[in-house]
């Protein structure tokens, strides 16, 4: 039997890049200690008794997905090193990034998370230098698990701080204090973690520019290497919808934008670089997993409510926890269960190239476009670029186009310009 290590996906070079076999995996862990007032993510509190059976179902979904993908790749005539299809040991490309998100993966007992990582290693392989992220929240991760998780191969922490103001944390319904965040990062660094991201929120009720400045200083003091900036979205079916849906009590849009620019310039002074509209990193600490999304590359999504982009389809798993568990508890014979939200063909992929690409501060490039699609951008896209440049929303730097400072505030207008 031959075992191939497909590091660079070279055998799928003939396929368009958006149809290739994924090299990234997102794992959704939909459990939280308490539901935050603004949250509309697929996450549930008070159902921790489902954790063991959820993980059993998750393992089945992962096994079935890889089995289906192997068959599909075989059917497309991808060949092994002896130019023959290998029946017994056909390998898929190694995973380069794995992201455990939620929900709150950090509240789940350590052994369940490790079991999933072991399964991925066994079933498909995880590259030696892969980025393996775990989302955690201060207040419900036993710090002694941090050492075990790091030893098991997790190497990036994404921690929800949201704000360094205790009264804002309370208003959001968070269960932690700023000090919990500080202690968590201190302990994490002590046991080896170097790649630590902190989330902060903008546009919160009663939040001031001074609060934003203070939160940036706090994150810097905690020595995080990456910061994600989120503007509060008031979503239907959340407690915040009832209180804030008409905007009363929320900062005016101009103030929210000022908060964003204050956070960005303050973080820049501290050595962070804005590499995506909402994400800043110290050199060498950009999120490789999220860069996959913004490059329009495929990724697996496992778990209740998880989204995936596989074989040119953007899919979503059932959002209903019981339905998900019941379906995948049927074992490895289960059929995959998902909705196809969108089929990405050549035209859609070209549109996404600009819509997703402009999120990155490195921008988009005509040469890169031609390399990826084998053709020049269609006329309507070139017209859109020229219009956006005239409006001062983007600027050209040689062959590349980037969002301008004004474009950062009107990014949606830029994205929409590429819809036919
Ligand atoms: S911790 Fe995150 S996923 Fe859980 S309820 Fe709060 S915002 Fe939602």
Image: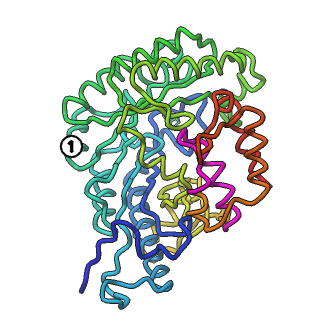
Report the span colored magenta: 346-368
Counting from the top left corner in percent of width and height, residue 56 is at 38, 61
User: Could you tell whether 374 is left or right of 142 in the image?
Assistant: right
Query: Going by the picture, which residue comes out furthest to the bottom?
Result: 84
Residue placed most toward the observer, 265 or 63:
265
Q: Secondary structure at mark 1?
A: helix
Residue placed most toward the observer, 244 or 90:
90
Q: Which residue is mark 1?
A: 148
Residue placed most toward the observer, 88 or 30:
88
Residue placed most toward the observer, 41 or 405:
405
Residue 122 higher or lower than 167, as above or below: below
Q: Quarter of the image holding residue 92?
A: bottom left
Total marks drawn? 1
Counting from the top left corner in percent of width and height, residue 238 is at 65, 33
Q: Is mark 1 within 8 Å of ligand 1?
A: no
Q: Residue at x 56, y 30 (%)?
A: 230
**Image quarter (top left, top right, bottom left or bottom right) of the N terminus:** bottom left
Q: Quarter of the image holding residue 138?
A: top left
Residue 131 higher or lower than 166, as above or below: below
Query: Going by the picture, which residue comes out furthest to the top?
Result: 210
**Image quarter (top left, top right, bottom left or bottom right) of the C terminus:** bottom right
Instruction: Count residues near mark 1 (Cα–Cα under 10 Å), then give few for <14, some for 14-19, many for 20+.
Output: some
């Amino acid at each position: 039997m031959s075992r191939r290590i497909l590091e660079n996906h070279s055998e799928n070079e003939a396929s368009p890049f958006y149809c290739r076999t994924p090299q990234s995996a997102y794992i959704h862990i939909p459990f939280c200690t308490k539901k935050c007032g603004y949250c509309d993510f697929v996450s549930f509190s008070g159902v921790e008794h489902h954790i063991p059976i959820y993980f059993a179902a998750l393992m089945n979904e992962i096994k079935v997905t890889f089995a289906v993908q192997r068959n599909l790749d075989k059917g497309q005539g991808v060949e092994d090193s002896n130019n023959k299809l290998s029946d017994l040991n056909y390998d898929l490309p190694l995973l380069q990034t794995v992201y455990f998100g939620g929900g709150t993966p950090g509240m789940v007992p350590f052994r369940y998370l490790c079991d999933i990582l072991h399964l991925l290693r066994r079933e498909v392989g995880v590259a030696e230098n892969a980025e393996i992220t775990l989302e955690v929240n201060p207040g419900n991760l036993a710090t002694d698990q941090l050492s075990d998780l790091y030893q098991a191969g997790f190497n990036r922490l994404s921690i929800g701080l949201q704000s360094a103001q205790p009264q804002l944390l309370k208003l959001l319904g968070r269960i932690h204090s700023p000090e919990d965040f500080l202690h968590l990062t201190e302990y994490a660094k002590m046991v080896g973690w170097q790649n630590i991201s902190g989330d902060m929120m903008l546009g919160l009720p009663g939040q001031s520019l001074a609060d934003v400045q203070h939160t940036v200083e706090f994150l810097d003091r905690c020595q995080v290497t990456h910061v994600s900036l989120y503007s509060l979205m008031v979503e239907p079916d959340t407690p915040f919808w009832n209180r804030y849906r008409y905007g009363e009590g929320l900062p005016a849009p101009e103030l929210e934008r000022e908060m964003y620019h204050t956070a960005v310039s303050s973080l820049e002074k501290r050595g962070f670089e804005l590499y995506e509209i909402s994400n800043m990193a110290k050199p060498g600490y950009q999120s490789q997993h999220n860069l996959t999304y913004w490059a329009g590359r495929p990724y697996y999504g496992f778990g209740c409510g998880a989204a995936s982009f596989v074989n040119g389809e953007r899919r979503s798993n059932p959002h209903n926890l019981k339905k998900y568990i019941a379906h995948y508890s049927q074992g490895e014979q289960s059929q995959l269960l998902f909705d196809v939200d969108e089929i990405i063909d050549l035209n859609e992929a070209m549109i996404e190239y600009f819509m997703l690409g402009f999120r990155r501060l490195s921008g988009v490039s005509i040469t890169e476009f031609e390399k990826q699609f084998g053709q020049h951008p269609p006329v309507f896209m070139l017209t859109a670029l020229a219009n956006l440049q005239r409006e001062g929303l983007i600027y050209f730097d040689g062959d590349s186009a980037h969002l301008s400072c004004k474009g950062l505030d009107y990014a949606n207008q830029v994205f929409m310009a590429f819809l036919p």
